[in-house]
Image: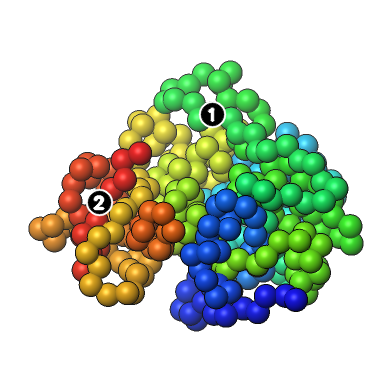
Amino acid sequence: MAEIPVAAIEPDSLDAGAVAHYGDPMREQRLLATAAGLVDRSHRGVVAVPGPDRLTWLHSLTTQHLTELHPPEGTELLVLSPHGHVEHHAVVADDGTTTWLDTEPGQAGPLLEFLAKMRFLMRVEPADVTADWALLSLVGPDAAVPGVALAPPAASPVPGPKFAAADVPARPTVAYAVAPLPGGGWVRRMGYGYDLLVPRGSGTEWAQRLGVPWAGVWAFEALRVADRRPRYGLETDHRTIPAEVGWLGAAVHLDKGCYRGQETVARVHNLGRPPRRLVLLHLDGIATDTLPAPGTPVSTVDGRVVGFVGTAVRHHELGMVALAVVKRSVPDEEPLRVAESAAAIDPT
């Protein structure tokens, strides 16, 4: 029998409408950390880009090196503003005929609008296919898809400032192995397990086929925070540049030629000091059961605001923790405050 969703995420959340948990969030976290569980992430947006020019076209518009992507394969990319600020983040899978971009909830439409404006005479047909396709994530050290054997992600090291071109391979900075699924869609190997793009409405069938229990988005998010993986719209604001939140290693190729915002990326990397950084905060002394909301200011004990909270969670081992973006000048040992809570930066 399928597990029954117990709680939906509140309507003002980026994950509004997703299943928060199935009755025991901490048990679900431990399941994902030590065994395997299936997370319904079908609230994410999906943009499909078929056409023979798709990879060269996306290569010219985004931060990633895509002309040497070898389907079936995936990676990550960003779309930047002319000043280098992050406007979109997408995880990629190319099946040989179509490049699939899965995005944060609500972002498929804006991403498609941008792509449509940049189409010109290229042989591409981008479309929002969120209504037809759903993303599921099979998470955990025991995660396995029957009949599918995929290599783990391969990532290139981020070169130091003023690097030589030979130090940066002409290929995607991270490569995710991809394979087709019976009945359509694909499976993509990620660091946390596998993402599956399946026809919308087939989630229960896939849970039975995989033989694993469901886990809620709260559990997935708790492990993401502990892994310090940022999300667009939570650990970003209108001023975020890729180097501040650690996207150089996954989504930005530093020697692929010109694209919108490239000058800012190169300048900040060569100087070696982005103005802010992503940190993990340990929260203590919370006077309420309510976790700080995204955007809650992070301040010093004398009230000087030095950053903002992105995602705060209750982790099954770490306790109450949060990802935050703070000024680079804030030392790891600086005592901080988040609303009613004392906060400390995890230096590891």
For label 1, the crowd category at 10 Å Cα-Cα, with few meaning under 14, some 14 to 19 and many 20 or more, is some
Q: Nearer the viewer, residue 194 or 253?
A: 194
Q: Which mark is residue 157?
A: 1
Residue kind at label 1, given as amino acid type: Pro
Q: Which mark is residue 344?
A: 2
Q: Measured from the top left, where is residue 292 in percent x and y?
A: 33, 68
Q: Residue at x 42, y 59 (%)?
A: 315
Question: Callout 2: helix, strand or loop?
Answer: strand
Q: Residue at x 76, y 41 (%)?
A: 150
Q: Residue at x 64, y 64 (%)?
A: 39
Residue kind at label 2, given as amino acid type: Ala
Q: Say whether residue 225 is visible.
A: yes
Determine whether, in the image, residue 92 is placed left or right of residue 18. right
Q: Say whether residue 230 is visible.
A: no
Question: In the picture, which quadrant includes the N terminus?
Answer: bottom right
Q: Nearer the viewer, residue 289 or 334?
A: 289
Which of disc 1 and disc 2 is earlier in sequence?
Answer: 1
Quarter of the rendering containing residue 301: bottom left
